[in-house]
């Protein structure tokens, strides 16, 4: 970990992308030689590098094959369909972009196209009809590796779990707030707590555990995205690493659940950290700027947003003094606001105000380009995971 991160003691320079040098650098540490260590990765590429390092050093952890299995969206879809064989998710692989209109027609509209091994939502497209499918051909290389699958209608959850020797503990979930119109494959933010009916909650837990079992994930954190469809929970994708830093912080703010501390304790065989339960409402709001917008160095917006009572963090991904060149894609946004409040209504007011100070006036209304999305099955209140 970077030495400035909470809990870190020492910085060891190593390029984690170079497997041989990473293993050499870690192998010199006394704790590694004694087997009292563990390598962790907190994003897709680092999770795979960590799994390979643990195997090379003889340290415990999820096998690299399991991490790879979770990264292969086509194989994972086929495996997860076995968990609900009566109503599987329709999908097909596409190796040539010009075939997209034909394959999308086979699946039926609306449908989703995405890279088979993509990360961070990059390259994901919602195709509402034949015209979108024709236009999407230009978005991908002619020879490619894509997945075309049916659009899953319903509210979305991001589920954090921690596995130990093949037993999967659900730590919590957040609800995803979708963006409107053509951006329905992106989000405007996340919020919690999310209180689900008992049957729905148990079905979500069963799906996540089943997917992790099928992939061979045995140890460490995982992040699974699920849609609550009229036919029951269905998988979007899963990863062998924690969710984004801001999602992990949401769980800490709302429930007092520290995903990273629990992960480190389980992986290193340490006592579990003391849990201090909380029942706050916490939310994440993404803020994006139109291409051509210049982020002034002396712009007072970030400081003003941070000063709003209830705001925990404001983060700009666009450096001051630069001009925004592209629209946000996938889970990559220009800025975000994290906040906590005693009620859902007060949380919304805080996020709206902070987002407006950053440069976007008013909240976005969830929609999905005319596609009906069933009402949420949850209520805003405490839940047990």
Image: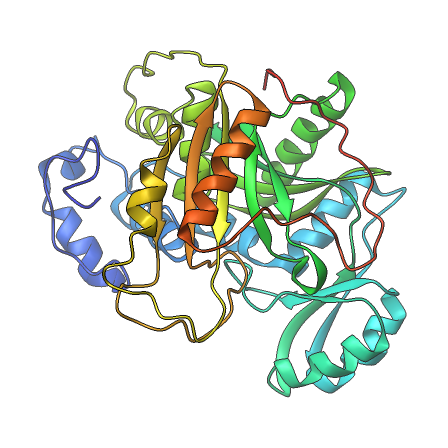
Q: Residue 110 location, x and y as percent?
A: 83, 62
- At 37% across and 48% down in the image, what residue appears? 51
* Res. 216 in view: no
Left or right: residue 323 compared with residue 364: left
**Residue nearer the viewer, 30 or 97:** 97
- At 75% across and 19% down in the image, what residue appears? 197
Q: Residue 159 location, x and y as percent?
A: 57, 35
- At 23% across and 34% down in the image, what residue appears? 37
- The image quadrant where one finds the N terminus is top left
**Residue nearer the viewer, 196 or 296:** 296
* Res. 9 in view: yes
In the rendered image, the vertical position of residue 201 relative to residue 74, given as above or below:
above
Which of the 4 image quadrants contains residue 58?
top left
**Residue nearer the viewer, 75 or 265:** 265
Left or right: residue 27 compared with residue 282: left
Q: Residue 380 location, x and y as percent?
A: 64, 22
In the rendered image, the vertical position of residue 184 relative to residue 341, given as above or below:
below
In the rendered image, the vertical position of residue 22 relative to residue 254, given as above or below:
below
Q: Residue 379 location, x and y as percent?
A: 70, 22
């Amino acid at each position: 970990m970077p030495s400035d991160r909470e809990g870190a003691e020492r910085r060891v320079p190593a390029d984690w992308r170079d497997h041989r040098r990473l293993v050499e650098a870690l192998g010199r540490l006394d704790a590694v030689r004694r087997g009292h260590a563990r390598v962790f990765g907190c994003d897709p590429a680092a999770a795979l590098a960590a799994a390979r390092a643990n195997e090379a050093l003889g340290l415990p952890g999820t096998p690299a094959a399991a991490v790879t299995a979770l990264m292969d969206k086509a194989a994972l879809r086929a495996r997860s369909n076995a968990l609900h064989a009566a109503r599987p998710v329709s999908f097909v692989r596409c190796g040539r972009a010009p075939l997209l209109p034909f394959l999308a027609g086979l699946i039926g509209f609306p449908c989703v196209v995405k890279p088979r091994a993509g990360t961070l939502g990059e390259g994901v497209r919602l195709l509402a009809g034949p015209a979108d499918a024709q236009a999407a051909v230009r978005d991908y290389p002619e020879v490619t590796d894509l997945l075309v699958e049916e659009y899953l209608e319903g509210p979305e959850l991001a589920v954090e779990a921690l596995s130990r020797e093949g037993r999967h503990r659900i730590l919590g979930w957040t609800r995803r707030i979708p963006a409107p119109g053509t951006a329905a494959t992106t989000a405007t933010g996340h919020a919690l707590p999310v209180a689900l009916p008992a049957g729905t909650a148990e079905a979500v837990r069963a799906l996540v555990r089943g997917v992790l079992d099928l992939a061979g994930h045995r140890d460490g954190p995982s992040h699974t995205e699920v849609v609550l469809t009229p036919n029951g929970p269905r998988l979007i994708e899963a990863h062998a690493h924690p969710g984004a830093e801001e999602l992990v912080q949401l769980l800490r703010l709302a429930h007092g659940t520290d995903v990273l501390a629990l992960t480190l304790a389980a992986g290193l065989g340490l006592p579990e950290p003391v849990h201090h339960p909380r029942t706050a409402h916490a939310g994440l709001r993404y803020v994006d700027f139109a291409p051509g917008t210049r982020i002034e160095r002396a712009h007072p917006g970030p400081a003003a947003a941070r000063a709003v009572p209830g705001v925990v963090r404001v983060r700009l991904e666009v450096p001051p003094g630069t001009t925004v060149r592209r629209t946000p894609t996938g889970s990559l946004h220009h800025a975000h606001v994290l906040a906590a409040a005693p009620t859902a209504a007060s949380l919304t007011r805080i996020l709206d105000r902070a987002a407006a100070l950053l440069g976007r006036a008013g909240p976005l209304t969830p929609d999905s380009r005319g596609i009906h999305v069933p009402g949420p099955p949850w209520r805003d209140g405490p839940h047990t995971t």
